[in-house]
Image (spheres, rainbow, N blue to C red):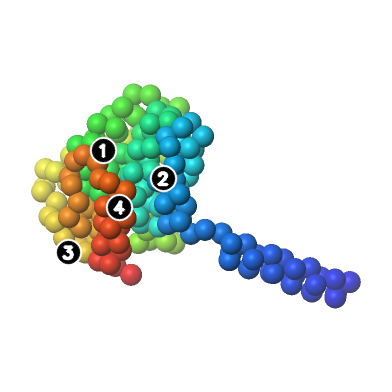
Amino acid sequence: MGNLTNISGVMVLGLLSAACATMPSSRQSAAVALQTAPAPAASQAAASAGLASAVDGDNWTAANLFERALNGDNSPANRFNLAASYQRTGRIQQASRLYRSVMVDGQFTSLIILPDTADRGGRMFRVNIADESQRRLVVMAFDAARGTPKASTASDGGVNASAIVGGPTRGTVSDASALRLDDKAEAIAPK
């Protein structure tokens, strides 16, 4: 029986390592989703790839993916995720507009909020997205009132690196520009 357990463990380890070798990275998944047409089935794929990009700190790419997800499914969850991406990339006016819409019709939707990419061991929270949208609007208004300074790194002043890499503060960016901006943000983000 002991040998069977050892063989099973080796088989599972072998399967896991094969899966790791064949699983595409989130950047590869994002690239595929960025090329996909905004059909309803592609909307879910774009939202999933957007979440993976956001977790990896690729906020510009995540925003483009969430835009595609929203085009296929104008749900409160997709608007909230896009607003969060806009907020992390410094597009505050667009984020505010989306957060306000989520406050109206997101009252019965909850999501798990992941910790910031700089705090990988941080706690996850389940939140009502209407309430969380209101909280984020208050924080953004406070930051605007005190004039949150531009910082050279994400840790200075609590500014996300994606917001200070030179991207636009409103509007959209091309997919190629989003990938370049994410690379710049990764280079200046604290390790």
Question: What residue type is disc 3 on?
Answer: Ser
Rounded to the nearest angstrom, the CA distance separating label 3 from label 4 is 23 Å
- Residue drawn 75% across and 68% down? 11
**Do residues under tags 4 and 2 come within 8 Å of each other at their CB atoms?**
no
Q: Which residue occupies the foreground of this view, 2 or 165?
A: 165
Disc 2 marks which residue? 35
**Do residues under tags 4 and 1 come within 8 Å of each other at their CB atoms?**
no
Q: Could you say which quadrant of the image residue 159 lies in?
A: bottom left
Rounded to the nearest angstrom, the CA distance separating label 3 from label 1 is 23 Å
Sequence-wise, which precedes: disc 3 or disc 1?
Answer: 1
Rounded to the nearest angstrom, the CA distance separating label 4 from label 2 is 11 Å
Sequence-wise, which precedes: disc 3 or disc 2?
Answer: 2
Q: Position of residue 140 (x, y in %)?
A: 21, 42
Sequence-wise, which precedes: disc 4 or disc 1?
Answer: 1
Disc 1 marks which residue? 95
- From where the camera sits, is residue 129 visible? no
Rounded to the nearest angstrom, the CA distance separating label 3 from label 2 is 32 Å
Disc 4 marks which residue? 176
Q: Position of residue 171 (x, y in %)?
A: 21, 39
Disc 3 marks which residue? 152
Q: Could you say which quadrant of the image residue 122 lies in?
A: bottom left
Residue farthest along the top direction in this orientation = 104
Instruction: Give the label, 3 or 2, closer to the camera.
Output: 2
- Residue drawn 26% across and 56% down? 181
Q: Position of residue 65 (x, y in %)?
A: 38, 43
Question: What residue type is disc 1 on?
Answer: Ala
